[in-house]
Amino acid sequence: MKANEKDYQKYSDAIDQIQQGNDAMIDLFNEMEDDTELIGFDQNVVNQIEKAKIKFGDDAVNEKINTVVREMLSWLDLEGVNSKDEGSDGS
């Protein structure tokens, strides 16, 4: 294929952009973590949550579930325990 300097530069720029896109995809792939369920709901509970979200909306159901779980967790002594995201310094 014959090309002048302008065509050569266009192809070179396109290849550079493709390479940058590939590098970005590789970075995203390398940063991926396993998607593990935080809570293993029974299928019956999942079905009820789905129905509630249809009837009341995602935000309302999420708020209710968070309120109930937050209250339940307040009964547990979790002081001094760090989550994976907090690390050992509690941040």
Image: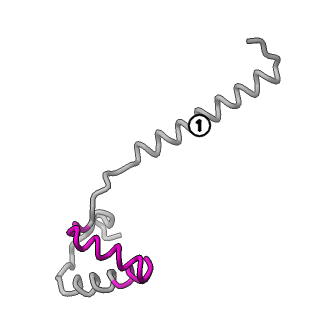
Per the image, label 1 sits on a secondary structure element best described as helix
The one nearer the camera, 91 or 60, is 60
Give x and y (percent) for residue 49.
32, 75
Q: Residue furthest top?
A: 2
Which residues are drawn in magenta? 39-64
Q: Residue at the location (52% across, 37% down)? A: 23
Q: Which residue is mark 1?
A: 20
Q: Residue at the location (32% across, 55% down)? A: 35
Q: Quadrant of residue 45?
A: bottom left
The answer to whether residue 52 is left or right of residue 83 is: right
The answer to whether residue 19 is left or right of residue 88 is: right
* Amino acid on which disc 1 is placed: Gln
Give x and y (percent) for residue 10.
75, 28
- Does 41 appear in magenta? yes
Q: Quadrant of the N terminus?
A: top right
Q: Quadrant of residue 57?
A: bottom left
Give x and y (percent) for residue 44.
22, 72
Q: Residue at the location (27% across, 66% down)? A: 38
Q: Residue at the location (53% across, 42% down)? A: 24
Mostly what secondary structure, the magenta segment? helix
Q: Quadrant of residue 43?
A: bottom left
